[in-house]
Image (cartoon, rainbow, N blue to C red):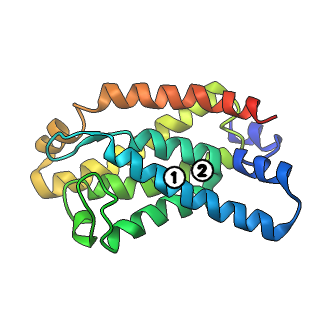
Amino acid sequence: MLNQTNSMNTETWIESIISKNTENKNMKILFSIIMVFLGSLLLIASAKIKVPLYPVPMTLQPLAVLMIAMLFGRNLATLTVGLYIFKGIIGLPVFAFGGGLMYLMGPTGGFILGFFASAFVVGYLADHGWGRKISLSIISMLIGMTIIYILGIFQLALLKGFNFALLKGFYPFLLGDFYKLLLAGIITPYIWKLSK
């Protein structure tokens, strides 16, 4: 399936927008930096829109991460999520309940690291044209969400036990996250069409 999409134009959505607006290399770099910064602000905002469940809050971050990865591609998406995590590590209150390096060692740290891994993988798939068809877009979102869950549940299980991790870090989110990834998977190809 991946080989079939390789024959397509592998330019990501954001790259196509940048290319339409300028041919100047310096302007492309500047526009990419601005998009990474704006994407990190979107991640901060999505962390603050939450249902405060314990110990893992329900946020819009998975949706934001998946959309950023699918529209920005691997390089810009990992830079965006990396910048967001860096802001949190240095103590800025960008995560759902604060910031700091120790936050990543807590019950939600695995989910946050999962955002980075998911951005890399989903962004890679986007680089290979998976964001242009609804079916491939949904499959890539499912892969990305699975990565977030695996890393999140793994760390939560190390801290609290596997049954607790499933009870508090998986089951309450399953239906909502499924709808988020379905929504993101359906919307992405339409965003592509609008940009043409």
Q: Which mark is residue 10?
A: none
Q: Residues within 10 Å of mark 1 (few under 14, many from 20)?
A: many
Residue 41 position in % (x across, y down): 47, 55
| Residue at the outermost right position | 23
Residue 126 position in % (x across, y down): 65, 45
Say left or right for 77 vs 176: right
Say left or right for 158 vs 70: left
The one of 105 and 165 positioned closer to us in this rendering: 105
State whether residue 76 is above or below residue 187.
below
State whether residue 16 is above or below residue 23.
above
| Residue at the outermost bottom position | 90
- Image quarter in which the N terminus is found: top right
Q: Does dot 2 land on a helix, a strand or a loop? A: helix
Q: Does dot 1 land on a helix, a strand or a loop? A: helix
Residue that appears at 60% across and 33% down: 137
The amino acid type found where label 1 is placed reads Ala
Q: Which residue is mark 1?
A: 119
Say left or right for 79 vs 156: right
Residue 98 position in % (x across, y down): 25, 60
The one of 115 and 149 positioned closer to us in this rendering: 115
Q: Quadrant of residue 32?
A: bottom right
Q: Which residue is mark 2?
A: 123
Label 2 with label 1: CB-CB less than 8 Å: yes
State whether residue 65 is above or below residue 1.
below
The amino acid type found where label 2 is placed reads Gly
Residue that appears at 55% across and 61% down: 37
Residue 149 position in % (x across, y down): 33, 44
- Image quarter in which the C terminus is found: top right
Say left or right for 98 vs 44: left
Q: Quadrant of residue 138?
A: top right
